[in-house]
Image: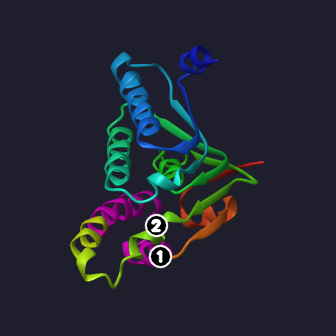
């Protein structure tokens, strides 16, 4: 199946996220860029966050690198949510080419771990750590703002608390462009 997916320019992201899975995903993007494929790259997503990976500086670094790779790509990159897209998976769905970001009707987007950036709000000893993480989070919000056409201030408030959103709500928010039913 892996060879068939590769021959059809398909990347399937599933399971739980961790640095290794995201590195493999990044290497697949680099591979497709190197071989100069014909046609679009299709990324299908159905996955959740690994709680051990929930709040880490590496996660944001990897996410911003994935966006940069997808943004500078010569090929069209289509993204589709096939079930659940939690946290970074939801962001990756939004990174697809505008008008080419899809979700199945009953797909769910769950943004939970973004609220962890506020976990240590009053901890003076962790102030610098929190400040650095928030700066990195603003990088992600800036990317999301460019993809959704929503102001950063709106997104900052929106992602402060955990949320489950349907594919219909994801479309209204600008994370996806169409619903496949």
Residue farthest to the left, as pictured = 128
The image's colouring method is rainbow
Q: Is residue 74 magenta?
A: no
Q: Is residue 120 left or right of residue 89?
A: left
* Above or below, comparing residue 8 to residue 160 in the picture: above
Residue placed most toward the observer, 58 or 180: 58
Q: Which residue is mark 1?
A: 160
Q: Secondary structure at mark 1?
A: loop
Q: Secondary structure at mark 2?
A: helix
Residue farthest to the right, as pictured = 181
Where residue 172 sits: x, y (%)? 60, 66
Residue farthest to the bottom, as pictured = 122
| Residue depicted at 54% across the width and 58% down the height | 175
Where residue 133 sits: x, y (%)? 30, 65
Residue placed most toward the observer, 6 or 111: 111
Q: If the image is split into quadrants, where does the N terminus sit? A: top right
Query: Could you classify mark 1 by the number of other residues whose Cα lies within 10 Å: few (under 14), some (14-19), or many (20 or more)?
Result: some
Q: Quadrant of residue 72?
A: top left
Gap in angstroms between the C-alphas marked 1 and 2: 7 Å
* Above or below, comparing residue 121 to residue 177 in the picture: below
Q: Is residue 158 magenta?
A: yes
Q: Which residue is mark 2?
A: 114
Q: Main secondary structure of the magenta part?
A: helix
Disc tally is 2
| Residue depicted at 55% across the width and 48% down the height | 99
Residue segment shown in magenta: 134-159
Instruction: Give yes or no for contact between labels 1 and 2 (Cβ–Cβ under 8 Å).
Output: yes
């Amino acid at each position: 199946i892996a060879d068939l997916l590769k021959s059809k320019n398909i990347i399937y992201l599933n399971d739980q996220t961790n640095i290794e899975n995201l590195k493999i995903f990044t290497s697949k993007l680099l591979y497709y860029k190197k071989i100069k494929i014909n046609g679009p790259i299709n990324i299908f997503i159905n996955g959740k966050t690994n709680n051990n990976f929930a709040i880490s500086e590496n996660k944001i670094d990897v996410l911003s690198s994935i966006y940069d790779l997808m943004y500078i790509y010569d090929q069209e990159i289509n993204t589709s949510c096939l079930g659940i897209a939690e946290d970074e998976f939801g962001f990756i769905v939004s990174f697809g080419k505008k008008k080419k970001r899809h979700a199945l009707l009953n797909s769910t987007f769950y943004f939970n771990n973004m609220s962890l950036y506020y976990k240590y709000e009053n901890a003076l000893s962790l102030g610098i750590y929190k400040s650095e993480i928030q700066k990195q989070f603003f990088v992600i919000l800036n990317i999301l703002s460019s993809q959704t056409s929503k102001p950063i201030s709106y997104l900052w408030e929106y992602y402060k608390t955990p949320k489950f959103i349907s594919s219909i709500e994801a479309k209204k928010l600008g994370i996806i462009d169409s619903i496949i039913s």
